[in-house]
Image: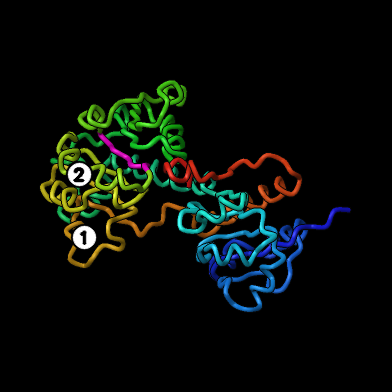
Amino acid sequence: MQAKPQALVVMDRQSFDAHFDSARLARLAELVTLGDPVWADDLDQPAVRARLAEVEVMLTSWGAPTLTPERVAAAPALRAVLHCAGSVRGLVGEEVWRRGIRVTSGADSNAIPVAEYTLAAIIFAGKKAPFLAADEDRAYQGWGTVTGYGDLSNFGRTVGIVGFSRIGRKVVDLLKILGDTTCLVADPYADAEEVKRAGATLVPLEEMLPRVDVLSLHAPELRETRHLIGADQLGLLPDHATVINTARGSLIDSEALAAECASGRLFAILDVTDPEPLPLDSPLRRQASVMVTPHIAGSLGTEIGRLTDHAMDELARWIARQPLQSEITAEALALGLSA
């Protein structure tokens, strides 16, 4: 009988408690050999370094230290890093790729609650619900008194998706529950036929902007995407359009967005901001036309268990030498095409 691989869980204590209840820890123990310590948030402590010498697989998550060349060198048997969260950017580096260590991500599973949040935000944007609720002069009056908010409807609207990412694709699919929705996608790397099969139409960003009632951002954070939506782009949006950002705060020029929202022309639902959190004097704060939530769209609470289960499913496939479903490559990571 083949010996079970040696494994180490690497994440901060809060993440470990969220990921591994007794049932999931028992499943992990069935798949691998867990030594002492089972879990670590510091790979430089002597006791952990002794374990690293024999560890073949790491399960990582939030709070895991960067796998620097020195730390990777201290783990000569390491063959796989299975990330129980989304992005591995900042966790793995050149030495991991050079060694041929397999890397997987839970980004597909983490995309589910983000897409669900986005759908809810789009529906609320259609009715302008957050902004009316924040308007003390109108929140408690009948709909017949509402002016200056545009059409309060979720039927026959046009939604623009910037970035045909894993989350963007899920949002396109979820939008099918709304009646007569036109879905446009802007993404220079997307294939037009693939977007069409998903139920949307691929168009250039500048062509999309004047047509949308809601603009939802799902692009990666790269040098080229910083302030992708700036003053010029915001100026192309129709009056009463809503901008939704669940991706990265840097995709939007915050000052330009604040100015448009303060004028009453645009609205915004932001789960991410730049900077994050917003400074107390940010013009995006305390505007009735802006709803800001504290980066809650991703996996939280019981949703985290889905990430753990995904990583352990990948672990079972890796042990059985089966194809991995969510493997990350250095090339895809550099292009922002993977988490």
Q: What stretch is highlighted in magenta?
A: 213-219
Which residue is tagged 1? 285
Asked whether the viewer can see residue 144, the reply is: no
Counting labels gives 2
Residue 212 is situated, as x and y percent measured from the top left of the image, at 25, 31
Residue 101 is situated, as x and y percent measured from the top left of the image, at 62, 52
Does residue 276 show up magenta in the picture?
no
Which residue is tagged 2? 230
Q: Which of 114 and 288 is in front in this view?
A: 114
Asked whether the viewer can see residue 273, the reply is: yes
Q: Which residue is drawn at 52% across and 63% down?
A: 68
Q: Is residue 194 above or below residue 119?
A: above
Residue 143 is situated, as x and y percent measured from the top left of the image, at 21, 41
Crowding around mark 2 (Cα neighbors within 10 Å: few <14, some 14 to 19, many 20+) is: some
Q: Nearer the viewer, residue 175 or 59?
A: 59
On the rendered structure, is 318 left or right of 205? right
Q: Label 2 vs label 1: CA separation?
A: 19 Å
Crowding around mark 1 (Cα neighbors within 10 Å: few <14, some 14 to 19, many 20+) is: some
Q: Residue at x 44, y 20 (%)?
A: 193
Name the mark nearer the viewer: 2 or 1.
Answer: 2
| Residue found farthest to the bottom | 46
Q: Is residue 259 above or below residue 301?
A: above
Residue 173 is situated, as x and y percent measured from the top left of the image, at 46, 32
Q: Which residue is drawn at 54% across and 62% down?
A: 69
Q: Does the residue at mark 2 contact the one at mark 1 (Cβ under 8 Å)?
A: no
